[in-house]
Each structure stands twice: as structure tokens, then as C-alpha cells.
Image (cartoon, rainbow, N blue to C red):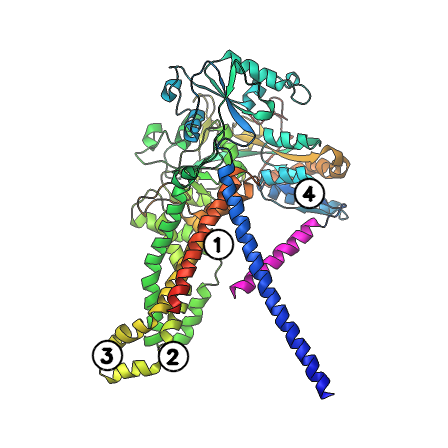
Amino acid sequence: MMKRKGKYKKVMERGTERLLSASGAVTGIVILFIVIFLFREGIGLFRSPDVEKGYALYLNTKNPVEQLTPYEIKQIFDSEITSWDQLGGPNKAIRPYRVDDIFKEYPEEEWGDHYELLSGKLEEVIKSDPNIIAFLPQRYAPPVGADIKELPAKNITIAGFFGGKEWLPTATPSPLFGALPLISGTLLVSFLAILIAVPLSLGVAIFLSELATKKTRQVLKPVIELLAGIPSVVYGFFGLVVLSPAIQKIFHLPVGETALTGGMILAIMAMPTIISVAEDALDNTPRALKEASLALGATKWQTICKVVFPYASSGIVAAMVLGIGRAIGETMAVLMVTGNAAVMPVTPFESVRTIPATIAAELGEAPAGGAHYQALFLLGCILFLITTMTTVIAEFVSKK
Amino acid sequence: MEKRAFKKALFFVVAFMLAACSRDNSSLKITGSDTVLPLTQKEVEVYMRRSPESKISVTGGGSGVGIAALAEGIVDIAQASRKMKFEEILKIGSKGIAVEEIVIAYDALAVVVNNDNVISNLTREQLEDIFTGKIQNWKEVGGDDIKIIPYSRETSSGTYEFFKEHVLENKNYKNGILSMPATGAMIQSVSQTRGAIGYVGLAYLDKAVKAVHISYDSGRSFVEPSFENAGNRSYPIVRPLYYYYLTASESKVDPFIRFVRSDEGQQAVKQLGYIPFTQPAPNNDEKKGEI
């Protein structure tokens, strides 16, 4: 009887072990899958044409211009470049033309039931005007030949993505995916957050572990941990309604939604993490070390500076890095307080747009598989690499 | 710890996907524009009270999401705050399905500035120059010597596209314009920034900000954004709100759509601050999106 029970127990144990290792393996595979998915979608961007997919630009063959950069195309359709001589052509006014324009000129009956007459009409339009640049769906495009030429399609380049300074993902005909302002915005906001959060959190951690009475500690610690439980939207709203007008007034700025506002909100959000990890590290200092230092005649402050701090330093660095990770990935609060202007930040008193905010705000409406969608995934990859790096550093330092 | 949280999240995702896959033919599914969402919800609420046996589920996500879902046959009605784009028509056409479009109400956009701003009239051309970055100081349009801070909505919003098409005539907003994730945030920011200018749906207008009178005839007449002016179309920045549905499923969606367009349904439109489509229109009402 006893023997059977023992056997049963063994089977159960082994089963549980299997189950645990299986769940570990599944989790690992899923994570790997997500990473592969992320990068596959992201890298796809560099195989996407720089003009909207399925569309092309058409010129009259009398026009000598053979190539245009995405930025030039954007300027043409925004009427910032108005004459062909700015692009190496004749001194004639550019006439930008979109497919919708033809619907204004000709009544619906003239296109045919399935738009089969459309391309003929478009052909007429382009033939008749040597200064036209027409942005048309390739399916209904007029035949390229003696009178009409198609601008050669190029792919979005790596340099254009990482070096571009304009983020206009929904611009037609040529969306601009310049990630530089977004990357630098993310780094600036995180840097400000760390700059504010680290000294404050270390102060609180030292106070909690070394100076506070047991009672204060019992009250303060749960309160600080409570801060971590507040939803980020609430922080964001607080930032928008309270912090941003305050910053606007104090620094006499035209706008209150700045990188600094975002940094301060993130600092408040990262503090609970940093405080509790740093406090644990300080707490782990052996009592014997501290008492030895005090017995040698060192003051309390000397003990903290010379004994406790060096002993806990690796834990403190880990706390800081965890805080950075929290700050870099935060979405909602930043989306609400930084103003989301995609410009290269020069001072902390300007609006910036961060990567997480961009993904959160734009992914919902980006057509799946399109260039905009892929660009957002690539931003996700960049974010992933940054946070992975911080985690690896944290692991490395805390093991020391 | 993190792994566990992750697995939990994964579980929910899978559960959600399973739920999304299980199709129930008797219920009506509506998705799409977040602008139309509150209106549809209200309509459904009233409609269900009248005929409690009907099952209708409503979700948001954006006009583009709705039309894509309609093309895939996942939903019965796509609510949209803009007309279907040419490429969307092509995509649906290539699948060999026909789609019907119907206007259910109108929505107007108001241009708002800070209450301390002395400006109360702007022309369309001035708005274009302000939002594309050509005019940068209020004194250029007759105001105080303050830098103009234009606020835009996020690119995913139908309002963003609508404003870009109708007011900026398809030009891009200036590079690095401030963009707000929601209407509430827009009003909040404009109310606390002196040089600010932004745009919100007429229904969201409140005393925290000042609505500018708009002229679309180069300054000859300026019209105040109000329900009356939007209703009789003298106010220019008005857009129709649409329902799209497959021609094949007309019999299924017809009772609900007829209800929305009935007097009772249009009463709800008014209550929510949108403009009923039945209001007298000076000319062809169905196509009146462009002014």
C-alpha cells in the first residue's frame, strides 16, 4: 500500500517537472517568435517603395527631370517647390496632379463601369501639359511611351530612415520616415527622467534603509510602492493638467508640453522601482560591516558613504538601469505630456515625440503590411534593442 | 514574475482571438471610426430598447480599420468619418464585392484658440498658412505679438485627415507640429497655452476655449461655428459621417440603418451634438462633403 502511494507521488512529481519545463520552453519559444516577427516586419521597410505602394509618379516626356527624392516630392505636392528649374528642369510652374483631381473634372459616367476609361482620360491630361507631375495608381496608369514617362521607383533607404529628420508617415505621395527625431526624443526624455529620478530615489532609499525609524519605514515603504500601481494615464493626466502649465509659467515658455515635463513625469513613475531595488541593495549590507565601521569611530554618515554605499553599489546601478528601462518604454503618460512634435530636440524646453508614443498613436490606423506599419515595427525593434541593452547591462553589473 | 505576466497576457490575446473567430451570424457587428463610435453606441442603445431581441456589437478603432474589416467580411457595417479612399475602393473591387455607402449624420469642426487671444476671425488661407508653418506669429493675422503654437491631432485620427483635406487642401502639416492623442487633451492644451490654435469636433466645444469664425470666401463673410450654421451648411468645415455595408447583406443591416435615419434616430444624433442629415441642405446633400 505504502509502496504504491510512493510510486504515485513519484509519477506526480515527474509530471509536474515536465509540465514546468514545458511551460518554460513554450514561453521561450513564444518570446523568440515575437522577436523574429518584430524584426521581419521591421526590416521589410527597406524593401518598400518610397512612393506609396501601388502608385507611381508620371511625367510628360518633354520634362527633362528623371529622378526625385522623397523630400523633393513632398515639397512639390506641398507647393514649397513651385518651379521645375529648382529641380534641374525648365523655368516653368509645376502642376501637381492627384487621381482625385480627375474626378472633379469629368463626371462619373465617363470613367466606365469599372473605371476602364480612366487611364485614357489620364493619358490625355498628362499629354496635354508638359509641366505636370501626376500621382496615379499603377493599375489605372496611362501607358508609358512616347509622351509619358514613369519616375523610377526606389526603395526606402537605411540612411533615409536613420538619418532622416522628418517624420511624416501619412504624407502622400511620398511618406517621410525619418526616425532621428524620434530616437533622440526618446533618449532625451529618458535621460532627463534619470537625471531627476536617480538622486531623489537614492536619497529616499538611503533614508529608508539607514536613517528612518522602523515606524516611518513601515508607513513610507508601502506608500512608495503604491506609486508604482497608479495607471500611467493618471500620471499623464496629472502631467497635462498640473505639471505642464506650471512649467510653462516658471520658465516663461510658449508651450508647457515639453521634454522636461515628460522627463519629470517619467521620473516620478520610475522612482518606486529605483527606490525599492536600491533600498533592498542597501539593506543587504551585512550588519557586521556597519557595526565594525561604527566601532572604529566612524560617524553614521561616514559609514553610509564609505561602507554601505560601496557594498551596495552594484545593486544601486542595477536599480538605475531598471529605472531607465521603465522610462524608455513608457507610452501613455509621455503621449499626453510631451506634445508629440517630431522635431530634433535642441533644449529640454521643446516638445518631443518618443518612439513608444509614436507606435501607440499611429499603429491603429496604419494599414497592415504597408510601409508605415513596417516603419513602426522597425521603431519597435530599435526600442527593443535599447531596452535589451539596458537589461543586459543591469544583469552584468548586478552579478559583479 | 515578468514571464508570468507575459503568459497571462498571451492567454488573453489567444482567448480574444478565439472569441473574435467564433462567428455568430445572427448578431450585427459594427466597427470603425472613433468619431462615429459614440453616435452608433447611442443609436444601438435606443434601438435595442425598441427591439430587445436584436444583438448588435459596436467597436471602434478608426475608419481605416472599419473598412478593412468590412472588406474581409468580419463585420456587417463599417462606420467611417471620411469617404472611402480610392485605394480602398480598388481593394474591395478586386475582391468582387459591392459596397453601399450611406450618410447618417454630419459633423462639424471648430477651430479654437485660447480665450485670451484677440483674434476672432480667420480665413481658410490664413488657417492653411498657420498649420503649414508659413505664418508663425499672431501679429501677421492682426493679433498680438505672440508666437503661434498650432496643435494637431494624431495621424490616426479621422479628424486629422479631414482637416488636412478640407482646410489645408491636402498639404502636409508643418514639420514637428504638436499632436494631441485626444480631443480632451487638445482643449486642455489650447486653454492653457496663450498662442495656441487647434481644431475639435463641434460637439466638444466648450467655454474653456474660443471658437474662431471662419471664412471660405477670402474674408468676405465669417461664419460662427454653431449647430444652426452647420445644419444649414453656411459654416464650411462640415463633413458627412458614413455607414458602409456589403450590398449582399443589405437585408440584415437594413432595419438598423433605417432606424438610424428615422426621426427617432436623428433625435439621438442631435442629442450627441452632431448634425442630423435631414436638415435642409442648399444643394445635393448626399455628396456635400466638399465645400
Residue that label 4 marks: B74
- In the image, the segment drawn in magenta is B1-21
**Count of numbered tags:** 4
Q: Amino acid at mark 1?
A: Val
Residue lying at the far top of the rendered structure: A128
Residue A203: name its quadrant.
bottom left
Magenta highlight on residue B16? yes
Q: Residue at x 48, y 15 (%)?
A: A61
Asked if the residue under mark 4 is in contact with the one under mark 1, i.e. CB atoms within 8 Å, the reply is no
Q: Earlier in the sequence, mark 2 or mark 3?
A: 2
Secondary element at tag 2:
helix
**Residue A160 coordinates in the image, percent (x, y):** 41, 37
**Residue A177 coordinates in the image, percent (x, y):** 45, 38
Question: Closer to the camera: disc 4 or disc 2?
Answer: 4
Secondary element at tag 3:
loop
Tell me: residue A106, above or below residue A229.
Answer: above
Asked if the residue under mark 3 is in contact with the one under mark 4, i.e. CB atoms within 8 Å, the reply is no
Q: Amino acid at mark 2?
A: Lys
Q: Amino acid at mark 4?
A: Ile
Return the chain for callout 1.
A
Secondary element at tag 4:
loop
Residue that label 3 marks: A299
Return the chain for callout 3.
A
Question: Closer to the camera: disc 2 or disc 3?
Answer: 3
Q: Earlier in the sequence, mark 3 or mark 1?
A: 1
